[in-house]
Amino acid sequence: RCAMRDPPPPTFEPHEPGTYVFQQGLRRLYVPAVVIALAFLGVGYALGRGGTAGLVIDGCVAIALLCLPVLDRTRLNPDNWLSGYFGERMVAALLDMLPESFHTLHDVTVASNGKKSNIDHMVVGPTGIWVIETKNWRGRFEQRGGDLFCNGVKRTNSVDQAVARATTVRRRLDVAGCGVGWINVLVVSTKARVQNGRIDFPRATVTGASDLLPLIRPGKHILTADAIGAIVSELERSKHKGSLP
């Protein structure tokens, strides 16, 4: 096992694929659910109260229900987060096809400097360490200059976030004494076509799901079985503290 040193490193907590995006979707539905529940209670109270007070309550309920559609439809639309959930499950199923010498972690919650983020998938194997961001969007990914676009909308932040999370992984392993020279970063599209089948940025690659395994599986073996075991043990450390559901 790697020897830990101060300062405290980031922590990692793997879950079942798609757990984070599914929980986020449920949280986004809390607001309309609470509004509707309060509306029913308000109507019931107003019917029992009657008179001017009842009319005022009914009016407030009506206004609340009328305002519901103007909330952020992107956040409330279940298709958006369900799409993300199924996209992550699909990529997880693909990664399960890797040889046994490759180890996969899914839906990893990363806690660093008091903040939390999420890594969709991590793979540790003979060909290196891979941090994978899944995008289950429709349309087409393309590169314009140094930026990534999907359907004409700038999406470079998806690449930047994945690179930042890979940097956090590397920092954890450096502090633990399991330093690695390079962590591969992939943004995987499960639906949208990728320009020329693959887009290479200085520190990340955007590719389609069908090309995921051919990118990870072959190549020069740079990690031994002992190194892989030490790295996976370090990244799964919180798993042994009973923190997983």
Image (spheres, rainbow, N blue to C red):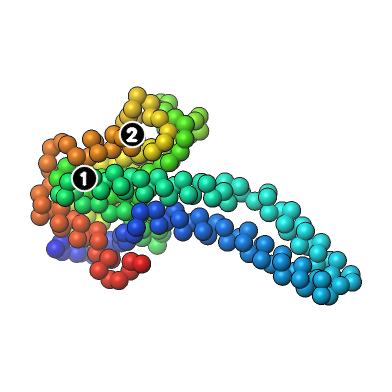
- Tell me: 142 left or right of 235: right
Q: Position of residue 137 (x, y in %)?
A: 45, 38
Report the front residue among 236 and 166: 236
- Tell me: 23 left or right of 104: right
Report the front residue among 148 and 115: 148
Question: Which residue, as the protein is rendered here, is positioned at the far bottom?
Answer: 49
Examine the image and state in which quarter residue 54 appears.
Answer: bottom right
Q: Position of residue 123 (x, y in %)?
A: 24, 48
Q: Position of residue 30 (x, y in %)?
A: 58, 61
Q: Is there any visible trace of residue 219 in the rendered image?
A: yes
Give the residue type at disc 2.
Answer: Thr
Give the residue type at disc 1.
Answer: Leu
Identify residue for label 2.
Answer: 207
The residue carrying pointer 1 sits among few (fewer than 14), some (14 to 19) or many (20 or more) residues within 10 Å by Cα, namely: some
Q: Secondary structure at mark 1?
A: loop
- Tell me: 196 left or right of 102: right
Task: From this view, report whether residue 127 is shown above or below residue 174.
Answer: above
**Which quadrant, please, contains the C terminus?**
bottom left
Q: Secondary structure at mark 2?
A: strand
- Tell me: 139 left or right of 101: right
* Residue occupying the point 41% across, 36% down: 191
Identify residue for label 1.
Answer: 98
Q: Nearer the viewer, mark 1 or mark 2?
A: 1
* Residue occupying the point 47% across, 35% down: 138
Task: From this view, report whether residue 102 is shown above or below residue 232.
Answer: above
Task: From this view, report whether residue 197 is shown above or below residue 46.
Answer: above
Q: Position of residue 223 (x, y in %)?
A: 13, 47
* Residue occupying the point 72% across, 70% down: 41
Report the front residue among 203 and 190: 190
**Which quadrant, please, contains the N terminus?**
bottom left
